[in-house]
Amino acid sequence: MSENEWESFKKTVKPIDKTKKVISKKFKNKIKILKKNSLVEFEDLEIVLSNNWGHLEKNIHRKIIKGNIKISKTLDLHGNTVDESKKKVFNFITQNFQTQNRLLLIICGKGERLSVSMGWKGTGILNKKIPDWLNSKALFDKVVWFDYAPQEKGGKGAYLVYLKKA
């Protein structure tokens, strides 16, 4: 390879993104879960560890997309505030993790629709917050993978969540 070819090749290469953090398996979350009708500390739900939405084994992912693995439970957050939704998502994930329900559906809606000139995009607050909560320190030891739901299950207005085994 000549010097000119090498220089032109270097211009086409995209550098590796070094801003993504690696999640340490040794990290333990310190969330106090108290009995019913008492407060739960949700501070760790705001601390995001990684921008990665998790990695799922290829065969399991294929089974989820085809519908061979059925959704165990569904949570609908329509009409809830951000604080109410945060508590509901945390409790929903925690309860299903303990009962070993693996595939969950969280419906948040697409949010307020923008005009045609803006491309009909949604501006949903919950739609933006849920990935942060699922990537947070509070839930990283329970969630293996999550992604937008298939179009027939809600598309970009819902999330499929796959939990670890208890």
Image (cartoon, rainbow, N blue to C red):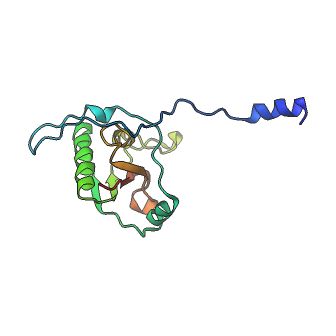
Picture coordinates of residue 102 (x, y %)?
33, 59
In which quadrant of the rendered image does the N terminus lie?
A: top right
Residue at horizontal 30 percent and vertical 39 percent from the top: 138
Could you tell me if residue 77 is visible in this image?
no
In which quadrant of the rendered image does the C terminus lie?
A: bottom left
State the residue in front, 4 or 57: 57
Picture coordinates of residue 50 (x, y %)?
44, 36
Compared with residue 129, is residue 61 higher up or lower down, i.e. above or below?
A: below
Residue at horizontal 17 percent and vertical 37 percent from the top: 40
Q: Quadrant of residue 104?
A: bottom left
Picture coordinates of residue 20 (x, y %)?
51, 33
Taking the view exactly as shown, the residue that stands out farthest to the front is 26
Could you tell me if residue 11 is visible in this image?
yes
Picture coordinates of residue 64 (x, y %)?
44, 63
16 relative to 73 in the view: left or right: right
Residue at horizontal 62 percent and vertical 34 percent from the top: 16
